[in-house]
Amino acid sequence: MALPSTVLLDRADFDELMRALTGRGYTIVGPTVRDRAIVYDEIASAADLPIGWTDEQDGGHYRLVRRADEALFGYAVGPQSWKQYQLPAQVTLWRARVDEHGGLTDLVEPPADPPRLAFLGARSCELHAMGILDRVLVGATHPDPADRARTADLFVIAVQCGQAGGTCFCVSMGTGPVADRGFDLALTEMLEDGRHYFVVEVGSERGAEVIGEVAHEAAGEAQIAGAAAVHDRTAASMGREMDVTDIKSLLYRNLEHPRWDDVADRCLTCGNCTMVCPTCFCTTVEDVTDLDGSHVERHQQWDSCFTVDYSHVHGGAVRSGTRSRYRQWMTHKLATWFDQFGSSGCVGCGRCITWCPVGIDITEEVRAIRQSEEVARLTGGCTSADD
Amino acid sequence: MLARPSEQPPFTSAYGPMAPERFEVIAKRQETADTWTLDLRPRDRVDFPFAPGQFTMISAGGAGEVPISISGPADDPAVLVQTVRAVGLATEAICAATVGQVLAVRGPFGGSWPTEVARGADLVIVAGGIGLAPLRPAVLDALAHRDEYRRVVLLYGGRSPDQLLYPEELARWAERGCEVLITVDSAGPEWLGHVGVVTRLLRRAAIHPQRSFVLMCGPEVMMRFVLETASAQGISADRVYASLERNMQCGIGHCGHCQLGPTLVCRDGPVYRWDELGPWLEIREL
Amino acid sequence: MQTIEDLIAVAPVFDGLSKDYLALIADCARNERADAGKFLFHEGDLADRLFLIRSGTVRLEVYAPGRGSLAIETLEAPEVIGWSWLFPPYRWHLDARVLVEAGLVSFDAACLRGKSDADHELGYELMRRFAAVMVERLMATRLQLLDIYGNAGAAV
């Protein structure tokens, strides 16, 4: 392509970039402030972005705070993820009429005609999460064509994080902070000496076409180095870290570790972590009839492994208590996901830590188990059970 | 990922895997006080090929969907046979279906019984309670190819004589070359057969450990004890296959409910070789 | 023609017992046959014999008024019936009905107990073996009690 692979986009031209997308029939979805959080929604112009906002995140803590500058992307990630577009919270699978013998007739599936979406502001961890979720949905034994259709024609503008969030640990998980694939365009926001611009990496031909309409100045070595410095600074300031060495084996051999009882004392099984996690994919199916039972719809909606019913078999729930449910969630995310889908399920976005009402920290839980093994090794096994 | 033991026919629904097909009830037989067998004919396609051990997701009239193992002979795919026990809303609605009623069926899903591993050897089938229903296609398949096996043995345990499935058929299987041993947990004076747990039949049948392969299905407690008894007799865990039950909802490895440690039961199972999954079954509330 | 000793030697419950001891306990034993329908003993009878089944089927039962005979368990070759002869008051707790004509080896219980008292080593060997039989029966009975095929509650 004629365009160089890295160009500069001036802040003043940002709306033009968005118009270049809407002009091609894309509906732009991006971050915006609502209810004191940064959520994803359809946006029309740069003014809808969380300009001048940043987030303060820690275990069970999330606050929006005003920045001293007018950065468009000066924050980490909010409670939502892009999974609501890949796997919507509620989907009607089909509708049917019920005849007088209780049989189904006139079954129709809702037409698959999703809007063409452009994601603006996807972070590296989120791109990895989308890939992981895609592998689960489309890699199912009999993939549902509706799943693929939702994001078949997705345009992605990634944002390279300008700062790490208080609960971020993408570096530990190998999922960031720099996105190197999976995007059409990737932006690094630069604010320096009164100048506000973006270093734009082109990731695809159509990305080149879109940015080609708006920006033509190639990035110089100084600007590219400046962007790289931002990336390095972000990578060095992660809020959390997790040692993932051999983590599958670590968890597989500690399924009866006393730490699970410890976390069970704190966990409320509220399921927040599963709602905010960008890779949690569990859904349940519900048949809904009208009052006289003559019409039925089947709904698929998000479910959580923290509910009692989740593991119900004839006779009762397999995971009857908090301990086994928390263990299921964490070992699935970090260990059994490898056996089921060939990768980790965690991208280190930190949402589960931020949005846990009691601040349970998955990195801390892993650390506790790993350290207890280390202590046992050093002391020859003669140690008290407490860390 | 655990290996799938057998080949099974490709999934061929005209709709997506989450939309059901219509199956009409053409016959209905009551097996026990709470169990019925329904013969279903597909309305949206010619036949429904499946492999022994696979299951479908069935619902009646919008009352909820359940996984039910297929119980008919695999060499007659024109009819889908399902034995269902009425234990809740969804299964009660299915059992209340009348001849002519149309049910919603998705499938077939899951892997199959690896009967071929026992070719030239002894095939030992151990069923507990309603666990005979998922094994029936394997028995019929073995009897249809009887000369491929040395012994074909069925060990069947039930709660009481009136809770046994397919009682007339059991006698016919014996005539076709299957050794049939039946036991019940409790019985009145009219029952002249074995009384006692099904694990005791393993010893009575004089199973040859080096020459036998076991297929089993029943309550998980029963299967653990069958495995213990079998292993005390020298049958190694890599010769034992079990069909497991977890909360299967989508049937396609999509909804996550059927997870059992590293495996998704609807996708990698429900039939597993015991040495592959045994250690995971020992962890309580996994 | 097989001697009583030969018949006892192949029984799993006496597996490993020395030739001398086998001969010793064979002294207490005799061959028996029982027709189908016959009761070997009734609940409350004096438990004065140990039975080893060589062929046929014996059913242990409990009689409940209004319900008739309830089957506890069926036993076949090469199993043994009962251990009530080991402990006072030496009374059977169940009925034993022959279902299928049975060939049995029966031992005089007083004879076995006498020889065990005289030779504690023999007594230990017999106790050990019958304890194992009891353990196996107990485990099986517990499984029966669990009623694992029963309807455990409302589900899907």
Image: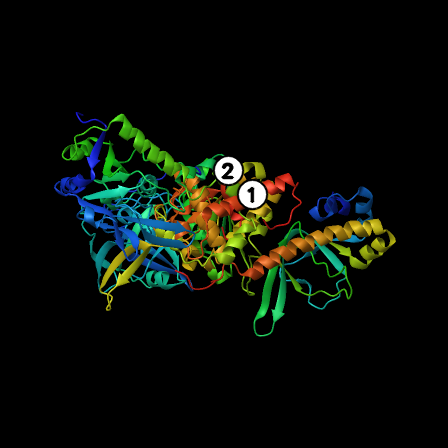
Along the line of sight, the residue nearer the viewer: A313 or A157: A157
Q: Which mark is residue A32?
A: none
Q: Residue at x 87, y 53 (%)?
A: C118
Considering depth in this image, is A121 or C63 the residue closer to the camera? A121
Amino acid type at image mark 2: Arg
Left or right of A333? Residue B126 is right
In the image, what residue occupies the spot 65% across and 56% down?
Answer: C137
Asked whether residue B205 appears in the rendered view, the answer is no
- With respect to residue B201, does A344 lie above or below? above
Q: Is residue B254 visible?
A: yes
Give whichever of B186, A113 is nearer the camera.
Answer: A113
Q: Is residue C24 left or right of residue A126?
A: right
How many marks overall?
2
Q: Amino acid at mark 1?
A: Gln
Q: Secondary structure at mark 2?
A: loop
Instruction: Name the residue beneath numbered marker 1.
Output: A371
Give the distance between the C-alpha atoms of the residues marked 1 and 2, in whole angstroms.
55 Å
Q: Is residue B87 left or right of residue C139?
A: left
Residue B161's x, y, as percent?
50, 61
> Which residue, given by chain and number where applicable, does mark 2 sit on?
B150
Report the residue at 50% width, 36% height from top: A246
Label 1 CA crowd tier, 10 Å (few <14, some 14–19, many 20+)? few
Q: Can you say whether C107 is above or below A82 in the image?
A: below
User: Residue lying furthest bottom in this view?
Assistant: C66
Please provide percent x and percent y for residue A143. 29, 43
Relative to A377, is C68 above or below?
below
Image x and y of residue C68, in percent: 58, 70
Q: Which image quadrant: the N terminus of chain A?
A: top left
